[in-house]
Image (tube, rainbow, N blue to C red):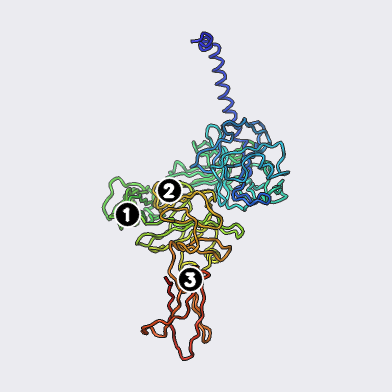
Amino acid sequence: MNEDVAARKDNPARKKLNMKRVILNVLLLALSVGQGLGQLAITEVMSSASTNLGNLVVTNGPDFWELTNFGTNTINLNGYRYSDSLSLPLVLLVQPGTPSMSIQPGESVVFVRTDVNTAVTNEGQFRAWWGPCLALNVQVRMVPRNPGFDAQSDGVRLYDPASNLLDRVDFGISRRGVAFVYDTNSAEFGVYSQLGVCGTCKAEQADDIGSPVVTWGPVPLRILAQPTNAAVCAGMDATFVVKAGGLPRARYRWFFNNVEIPGASSATLTVTNAMPAQAGAYEVELSNGAAVIRSVAATLAVSTTPSRPMIMTAPSHASVIAGQTARFSATVCAYPLAAYQWRSNGVTIAGATNRMLVVLNCALSMSGTEYCLEAQNSLGVTSACARLAVALPPQLEITEMMSAAFPSCHHEDWFEVTNRGTNAVNLLGYRFADRFTLDGVRVVSDSVIVEPGQSAIFVERMSAEEFRLWWGADRLPPGLPIITYVGLGFSEQGDELYLWSPGAEDPFDLIASTSFAGATSGVSLDFTENIFGEDSVPGERGAFSAIECGDIGSPGYVGNPPPRFVRISADGSAVTLKWRALVGKTYQLKWKDRLTDAVWTALVTRTAEDWIETASDSIPGSATQRFYFIEEQP
């Protein structure tokens, strides 16, 4: 070994110096984390940029978000991370191989999401996009596009180097080309930027409206809604809620009779199974680095008035798929506290002595089982029951998706689910998401029956009537179920979709899923030979052109449908007939006056030039009835 190297390794003074450096680095990290906790706030997000870049039409604009330092200390952002979902990997604000970055007191910086598919891939392009709206001396950093922001609803979360959550904002449906900012009175995030207000301006090369690196300043910390008193029966739950305003955003510490409650650090506090010893005063302390305030004390009263058990919330019926878990629960008011016992079809279940019953790995043979909870104390007994329904997994399949409707008509994303099985399926409670997580899923809130062979449409923000006007009611299958949802958007550059049953507790317990790599504007994606992601083609697999804007898709169809009459109307001695057709196919319209007649008479033979064809028939005055038949020719 080199003597000089050995001397350096064994040098006690050098070891001591290195140890001091390690301690200093740890202290600096702790100081940075502590400062970030009360100083940093997310102040602006653009989740749906405009579709134009000068004269260029783009499909993927430069989403960005803004971070502001409202404190008095400089913070080094190396090691800080962000995400748009708790289920996604955290992304470094300062990417490896890029210069170090600090944020000064009162400074705002912008983080621009980018990848090879975006219209803006570097800082120079972003500055050119916004032009004079963006000062030359402000900091702009490009970060990976994944995680991505949804245009319908999403959020941003900021974490320190130790992965502690520092700040979080959530926002709803975007307006294309308009940024989200915070309300100057309440500091509530998610209001739309307004041109000319608080530094908001229009980008030089696009129609985007925002105020990158121009904030509206801090908002004083205050309580907008105080926690309120609660009175519950012994053994029941009590919840206290506080609503706060202020920027930087509030941190919470709850107290019971002036003693801090360990771990109680959110805007909501739930006291479970409240007992007389937990009756008293509950208050919350709010702080944001600039101020500290306390709420009024809310009183929890726990009733110990003697009473026989009373069912306050009865257990609900449960419907699960074979192999899933069923859960039954009830709330009971009783004093002395009730003893619980669950029974299955009258048979006592060993160990089932709580308010909640968990039934694991439900089998088909268990369907129809009645589960009853008996609550008893020295003053009486009461019971409540619920039934379990267990079914085979439905054969549902995601058969079509449109993530890139023609932008000029401002139509929305939609997807199609088809029942390939032999039993009807009620979609009530079914959940879906574009991420592989059960957090933040969208839920079908109404009873929607999908018959065997039938399809249902899920459309973003559009009513069923608006969807029918878009595609043409006569062109769609009769009785097509259309479900409106909010808060899920698909990227034109590729995305995923997952569907779960109401009883799924594990994301791997899927009913259906699909993914696609990209989409053609104005054309839906569907199946071709069991491969999802092929462009719909007019006249194939039921595809046709929409009345509004001419988008191509086959909503409600998984194959070319046979011809069907959509309208027959009589006017004097003439009859007008309309039928659903396939462009390019030849049809023969026939008639006869009596069904018992042996022969149909040809009225017209025509090659369809539209998806709805029309023909007329003159009926002799002596005729009292006439029957019609439409047939597709070979």
Which comes before the other along the chain, label 1 or label 2? 2
**Residue occupied by mark 1:** 371
Q: Residue farthest to the front?
A: 634
Report which residue position mark 2 lands on: 236
SS at badge 1: strand
The residue that appears at 52% across and 9% down in the rendered structure is 7
Q: Which element type, helix, strand or loop, lies under badge 3?
A: strand
Residue type at the position of mark 2: Met
**Furthest-bottom residue in view?**
622
Mark 3 vs mark 1, CA separation in Å = 51 Å
In this picture, residue 50 sits left or right of residue 388: right
**What is the x, y in percent for residue 173?**
58, 53
User: How many residues crowd mark 1 within 10 Å: few (<14), some (14–19), many (20+)?
Assistant: many
Does residue 557 appear left or right of residue 131 in this picture?
left
Q: Which residue is mark 3?
A: 580
Q: Are marks 3 and 1 in contact (CB under 8 Å)?
A: no
Residue drawn at (73%, 50%) of the image: 196
Q: Position of residue 562 (x, y in %)?
A: 43, 69
Q: CA distance from mark 2 to mark 3?
A: 60 Å
- Residue at 42% across, 45% down: 273
